[in-house]
Image: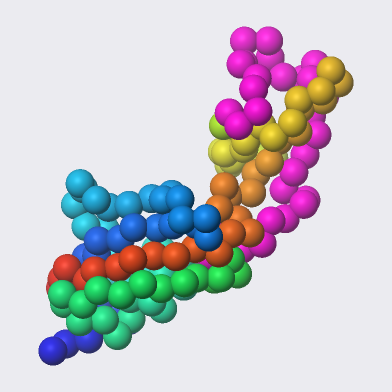
Amino acid sequence: MTAAKSGDTVRIHYTGTLSDGSVFDSSEGRDPLEFTLGSGQVIPGFDTGVTGMTVGETKTIEIASDDAYGPVQEEARQDVPRAQIPAEIPLEVGIQLQMQSPTGQVVPVTVVEITEEAVTLDANHPLAGKDLTFALELVSIG
């Protein structure tokens, strides 16, 4: 059987869970995820985990945060004076907003704290700092 290698386009079904067992993403009920191995389209640990699999094979991989979305970076958290946030923007902890970087790039941020004076925004990926587990099934190599 042919094993998946860098440069191959693969299609996989997956279910991603956190260390507490909660599911954060899954292809269940959807088309398999298609990507090119080794191209940087998925997190590094995912690429590594699929490499060497054969069609029909299933396995579970554990990906440390460093090979997933990286560690939480404190510099990605920012306090913004509440007065600088337009009144029409609803503010509650957990809501996602979009900011624009000085270069014009849109950056998703999450409201993590609200006080009378400031709103703390976090631009870290929601899965930063978390170890991830994926149940994988290789559907095709093409």
Q: Position of residue 87 (x, y in %)?
A: 68, 10
Which residue is nearer to you in this view: 60 or 34? Answer: 60
Q: Residue furthest top?
A: 87
Q: Main secondary structure of the magenta part?
A: loop
Q: Residue furthest bottom?
A: 1
Q: Is residue 97 above or below residue 138?
A: above
Q: Does any portion of residue 40 appear in the rendered image?
A: no
Inspect the magenta stretch and tell me whether residue 121 lies in it: no
Which residue is nearer to you in this view: 104 or 70? Answer: 70
Q: Position of residue 105 (x, y in %)?
A: 58, 42
Is residue 48 shown left or right of residue 100? left
Q: Position of residue 88 (x, y in %)?
A: 62, 10
Report the quarter where the N terminus lies. bottom left
Q: Quadrant of residue 49?
A: bottom left
Report the quarter where the C terminus lies. bottom left
Q: What are the residue bounds of the magenta stretch?
A: 68-95
Which residue is nearer to you in this view: 99 or 114? Answer: 114
Q: Position of residue 93 (x, y in %)?
A: 65, 28
Inspect the magenta stretch and tell me whether residue 71 lies in it: yes
Q: Residue furthest front?
A: 20
Q: Residue at x 65, y 44 (%)?
A: 123
Q: Residue at x 16, y 87 (%)?
A: 2
Q: Residue at x 61, y 63 (%)?
A: 70
Q: Residue at x 29, y 85 (%)?
A: 52
Q: Is residue 28 above or below residue 64?
A: above
Q: Quadrant of residue 100?
A: top right
Q: Residue furthest right?
A: 117
Is residue 15 shown left or right of residue 122? left
